[in-house]
């Protein structure tokens, strides 16, 4: 999908709404994210922290969980925001989550503009890296 075909303001508004539901008492840093799916659905998530700090969930975890739970599909555009509603770069692990469910062409609204995931996570580890060694499909 081309950048101009996406209603980035609406997608960002969904991310802001998700951010307002965040459970972030330890960091005080609420995050929200929303993704447009290839069938037109919008899925979203917020960060959910834990007193055992390392097991806290990033907002993107909730988004991909909702994606799977509501029928799957491919992410075509993603907007992640901070408490100010400004674009936020997903952490490294969450870039991998977005690539898994959107591929290198999925678009991300970043602080420096809309970029494809191929630029946000260059040379991403993917199923082909496993298949290259095993000679079998990495997915079942
Ligand atoms: N956080 C996210 O939810 N997504 C990201 O991509 C970056 C970080 C959350 C994790 C933690 O709850 C808070 O932001 C501060 O790191």
Image (spheres, grey):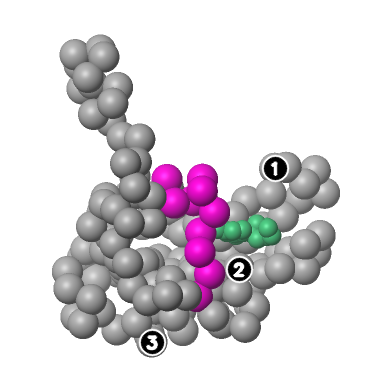
Question: Whole-Å distance between the Cαs marked 2 and 3?
Answer: 17 Å
* Chain part drawn in magenta: 87-96
Inspect this view and state whether residue 68 appears. no
Q: Say above or below: 98 vs 111.
A: above
Q: Position of residue 38 (x, y in %)?
A: 21, 63
Label 1: few (<14), some (14–19) or many (≥20) C-alpha neighbours in 10 Å:
few
Image: 72 above or below 79: above
Q: CA distance from mark 3 to mark 1?
A: 31 Å
Q: Name the residue that disc number 1 marks.
A: 55
> What residue is at 72 percent from the left and 42 percent from the top?
54
**What residue is at 17 percent from the left and 73 percent from the top?**
2
* Residue sitting nearer the eye, 96 or 68: 96
Q: Residue at x 37, y 76 (%)?
A: 113
Q: Earlier in the sequence, mark 2 or mark 3?
A: 3
Q: Locate residue 135 relative to residue 92 in the image: left or right.
A: left
Mark 2 element type: loop
Q: Which residue is mark 2?
A: 31
Secondary structure state at the residue bearing disc 3: helix
**How far across and down, in percent of the image, does residue 98 sit?**
39, 53
Alpha-carbon distance for marks 2 and 1?
16 Å
Say which residue label 3 marks: 9
Res 10 → quadrant: bottom left
């Amino acid at each position: 999908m081309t950048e101009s075909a996406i209603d980035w303001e609406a997608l960002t508004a969904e991310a802001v709404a998700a951010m307002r539901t965040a459970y972030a008492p330890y960091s005080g840093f609420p995050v929200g994210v929303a993704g447009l799916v290839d069938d037109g659905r919008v899925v979203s998530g917020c960060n959910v922290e834990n007193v055992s700090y390392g097991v806290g969930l990033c907002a993107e975890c909730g988004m991909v969980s909702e994606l799977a739970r509501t029928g799957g599909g491919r992410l075509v555009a993603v907007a992640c925001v901070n408490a100010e509603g400004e674009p936020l770069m997903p952490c490294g692990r969450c870039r991998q989550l977005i690539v898994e469910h959107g591929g290198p062409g999925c678009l991300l609204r970043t602080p420096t503009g809309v970029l494809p995931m191929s630029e946000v996570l260059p040379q991403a580890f993917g199923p082909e890296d496993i298949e290259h060694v095993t000679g079998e499909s990495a997915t079942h």
